[in-house]
Image (cartoon, helix red, strand yellow):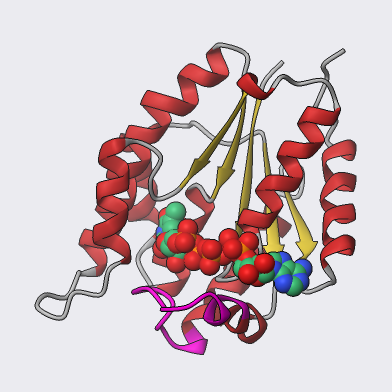
């Protein structure tokens, strides 16, 4: 029992909405609410949430270098994985993650153009070979995703990046999904909400993620 299920994707893809769909699926398959943990990245522990603020806020006085951005992502992730996710999985719980390591490959790797091998070295230090049981990439055309993100109000430090940046990120998510098709699935997040929900449920059923009962 227990699994780590992660929702990934570009800005405004509907990951938070998808987290709720996964949670509802688990509940309807007999998992108790107390056995479902929701996490978000960067964030999810007291210290990781402080790091999230640094990463998301636009600082007019000091630019955050790509290297600092990468290290902060992993600083937050090692806190979350070691203090929250691993203990929850060891206790047989389900963890639903709003973003995880694939975001680093997409945003810092493809988006910022950082060396994937160097990223791999830092990942190894931070979380070793820890990885989700299932990742669902919520795929949306970046302009449509940004339209949704914009409708929610002020944009953060990432959301003001260029369309090229977001296109590279989208391509990276899709390429990784193709490379690891056994554990990374893609859902068309540009559809109407009901169709998106149905596709997520289909992915969960096919992955036989819930073996309770
Ligand atoms: N980051 C993160 C990195 O660079 N590297 C990393 O390693 C990690 C972990 C985190 C930022 O950090 C970066 C990526 C991010 O820029 P975030 O707030 O966690 O920031 O991530 P965001 O992508 O900014 O999250 P959003 O809240 O913008 O997007 P969601 O969660 O994908 O979208 P959601 O569910 O809030 O939906 C957005 C809006 O669209 C509507 C919703 O109601 C909502 O209003 N919506 C739909 N509308 C129509 N049809 C549908 N099917 C819809 N689905 C949702």
Magenta residues (range): 148-164
Quarter of the picture containing the C terminus is top right
Q: Residue 90 falls in which quadrant of the image?
A: top right
Classified by dominant secondary structure, the portion drawn in magenta counts as: loop
Give the image location of residue 34, x and y in percent. 61, 20
- At x 81%, y 36%, the residue is 25
Give the image location of residue 180, x and y in percent. 69, 49
- Magenta segment includes 184: no
Quick one: 86 or 118, which is closer to the camera? 86
- At x 66%, y 26%, the residue is 3
Q: Is residue 43 visible?
A: yes
Q: Is residue 209 above or below residue 156?
A: above
- Left or right of 139, for residue 42: left
- At x 59%, y 70%, the residue is 12
Q: Is residue 60 above or below residue 4?
A: below
Q: Is residue 139 visible?
A: no
Quarter of the picture containing the N terminus is top right
Quick one: 50 or 92, which is closer to the camera? 50
């Amino acid at each position: 029992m227990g699994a780590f299920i992660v929702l990934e994707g570009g800005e405004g893809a509907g990951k938070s909405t998808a987290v709720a769909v996964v949670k509802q699926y688990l509940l309807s398959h007999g998992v108790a609410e107390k056995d479902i943990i929701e996490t978000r990245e960067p964030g999810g522990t007291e210290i990781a949430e402080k790091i999230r603020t640094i990463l998301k806020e636009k600082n007019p006085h000091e630019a955050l270098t790509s290297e600092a951005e990468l290290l902060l992502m992993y600083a937050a992730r090692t806190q979350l994985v070691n203090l929250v996710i691993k203990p929850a999985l060891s206790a047989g719980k389900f963890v639903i993650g709003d973003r995880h390591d694939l975001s680093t490959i997409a945003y810092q790797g493809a988006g910022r153009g950082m060396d994937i091998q160097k990223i791999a070295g830092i990942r190894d230090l931070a979380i070793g070979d820890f990885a989700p049981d299932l990742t669902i990439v919520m795929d949306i055309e970046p302009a449509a995703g940004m339209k949704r993100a914009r409708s929610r109000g002020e944009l953060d430090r990432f959301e003001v990046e260029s369309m090229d940046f977001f296109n590279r990120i989208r391509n990276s998510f899709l390429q990784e999904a193709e490379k690891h098709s056994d554990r990374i699935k893609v859902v068309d997040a540009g559809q109407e909400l009901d169709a998106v929900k149905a596709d997520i449920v289909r992915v969960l059923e096919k992955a036989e993620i819930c073996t309770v009962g």
